[in-house]
Image: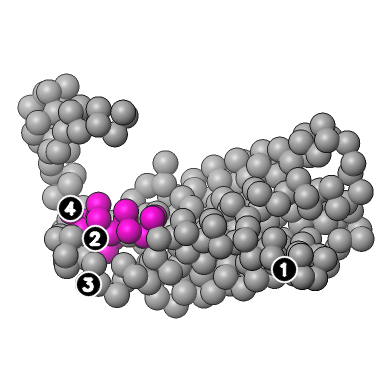
Amino acid sequence: MVGLLALVIVIDKPEHAHWLDDREKQLVLADLEADRREAGPREHGLTQALKLPQVWLLTLIHFCALSSNLTIGFWIPTIIQGLNVKNTVTIGLLSTVPFIAALVGMVLVSRHSDRTLERRYHAALPCLCCAAGLVGIGVFAETHVLAFAAIIVAVTGALCYNGPFWQIPPTLLTGTAAAGGIALINSLGNLSGWLGPSVVGWLEDVTGKTAAGLYVVVGLEVVGAVLILLFMPRGSIKTRTE
């Protein structure tokens, strides 16, 4: 329903925005034109965008990096229970702590990324932090405090990646290419939300340990980070994460 309503309410161009006066419309148009000049040539059509290797590379990166999100969210109660926490209410309360820490981390990382206009490291390093946290869950399984700290690191890294990453596609695409390309990246990337939890569950059945499946997700996170650092645009990217 909201999507259908957006077709009616959302306008396509600044000059169609009835809530802006003529001066404000000109300011918005001038800002958009300056952005186009700074960014240089970018693909405009959807068909052209789907032919770009960068679009499919971004899709692969997002698939790898996003593998941890639903995996961690799905398995956190089980992992915490494995830390000798048996009370259901306590498990639920402890499960919220990593996400509170991640909320703070997301704001800090996004703001720093905006201040420095840097996206590659701000997207890649959270992936590596997430990978380190997932490894720590397995390594410190018998040291419950450290294992719980590793969960916090993993969740924070997984969620901090998103803001800076989504500033990269608009630097390569614009117009219908941006809409279609971003939709493709998001849709196919989210398929890892099915893969991650399934692999963890299967390997837990095979090995009897949740950590075995988490190490697969670690590999995906590292691949995503490496691809970002190797192939994403270097230098300042003038788009905001907030």
Does 118 appear in magenta? no
Is any atom of residue 198 visible in this view?
A: yes
**Cα separation between marks 2 and 3:** 12 Å
Label ID, residue 51: 3
Residue at the (23%, 67%) spot, across then down: 50
Mark 1 and mark 3 lie on one chain; the one further toward the N terminus is 3
The span from disc 1 to disc 3 (Cα, nearest Å) is: 36 Å
Judge depth for marks 1 and 4 and give the one in front. Answer: 1
126 w.r.t. 97: above or below: below
Relative depth, front residue between 138 and 227: 138
**Residue in front for this viewpoint, 106 or 85:** 85
Asked whether disc 3 touches disc 4, contact meaning CB atoms under 8 Å apart, the reply is: no
Marks 3, 4: nearer the viewer:
3
Is 94 displayed left or right of 13 in the figure? right
Q: Label 4, on which residue?
A: 175
Instruction: Report the mark closest to the observer, 2 or 1.
Output: 1
Q: CA distance from mark 3 to mark 4?
A: 15 Å
| Image quarter in which the N terminus is found | top left
Q: Main secondary structure of the magenta part?
A: helix
- Tell me which segment is drawn in magenta: 171-187
Amino acid at pointer 2? Leu
Counting residues from the start of the chain, the first of labels 1 and 4 encountered is 4
Measured as percent of width and height from the top left, residue 159 is found at 57, 50
According to the picture, the residue beneath numbered tag 1 turns out to be 203
